[in-house]
Image (spheres, rainbow, N blue to C red):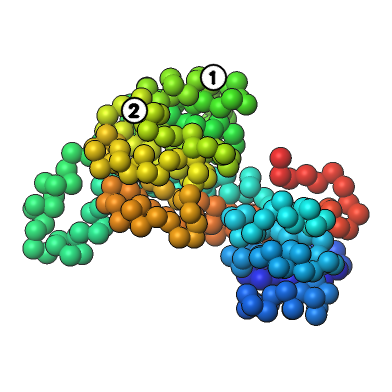
Amino acid sequence: MNILVTDGLSQTAVSQLTEAGFNVLSVKVAQSQLKEYINAKNIEGIITRTTFIENEVITGAPQLKFIAVIGNEQVVSSVAEAEKNGIQFITAPVAATRSVAELVFAHILGGSRFLHHSNRNMPLEGDMNFKDLRNFYSGGIELQGKTIGIIGFGKIGQEIAKIALGFGMKVIATDPNVVGAKLQLKIQDQNVEIGLKTVNLEQVLENSDIISLSVSEQKNPIIGAKEIALMKPNGGIVNISNGNAIDEEALIEALEDAKLKFAGLDTYDNEPTPAIKLLMNERISLTPHIGGLTGTATERSAALIAKEVIAKFHGKSGMDFFK
């Protein structure tokens, strides 16, 4: 089987695939030439990280058996269309769990101490207005003792909870599919188990200083004007899951009215062209959907995807890494 790797794959993963009998072609192909290349080289599998796989590739390469994505699955125009055409979609979301959870706290720490705003103004005014900026950015909040509300308590939500506990935060969570969880924390050489039970959404909104969303794609926003009204004044909210989980207009209004102190966004309702109102709002810490794209997570994801491809297309079984 010929496999096209569009964005580079770790040598370990390439070796695993090669040793299993796959012909791995690591080639950066121009978007406009991708379908022609795949058909000319009889490519039956694609492994991509950032190269966008358009519908014309999905529908125009009948020999294609799988598309594997390292990181963000939104590089595939339609997973449903791929599956409709008999193309298996392979990813490794568990590989990025820690990376995504850590980015949540990058946004939380930045918002709590005005780092996203200070980083804009220090290069412009730091040499002339140092004392004024110092006064302006004083009054941040400490995380210890604060309550974080986690909406979506799957693997990522639980990893967020572990980090929050390390900061000395109180944790409450909601998830219609999870009654509770036993969190395993390793502190130095000691293992600690902490049990948490989920509560309803209203309790999370009313009692949290900071809200973090880690949910799957939604038909309608989970957080809108009604839900924001239930939140504590001067709170913060971070969304690293799906852009449509938050009503962006309601979020902007809450920030402009100072109902919310800050927001952190890694995903947007309209990608890859987020609303300009979001991009220009100084109360929002912004990243371009990089939650799972650390070097470590990418390496881990590549290794898991290689094993999954071998398991599915080389006759081996019992290797389901992605539940």
| Disc 1: which residue | 197
**Quadrant assignment, res 313:** bottom right
Instruction: Tell me whether the residue at label 1 lies in contact with that at label 2, contact meaning CB atoms closer than 8 angstroms.
Output: no
- Residue 158: x and y in percent read 54, 33
Say which quadrant the C terminus sits in: top right
Q: Which residue is more in the foreground, 40 or 178?
A: 40
Q: Residue at x 16, y 43 (%)?
A: 138
Circle 2 residue? 229
Name the residue rendered at 54%, 19% in the picture.
Answer: 197
Residue 33 spot, x, y in % from top left: 68, 79
Question: Image height check: is 140 above or below 316?
Answer: above
Label 1, residues with CA under 10 Å away: few <14, some 14-19, many ≥20: some
Q: 131 and 35: which one is in front?
A: 35
For the N terminus, give its image quadrant.
bottom right
Figure check: 112 above or below 169: below
> Left of 258 or right of it: where is 75?
right
**SS class, disc 1:** strand
Q: Is residue 210 left or right of residue 23?
A: left
**In this orientation, does residue 303 appear?**
no
Q: Residue at x 43, y 56 (%)?
A: 274
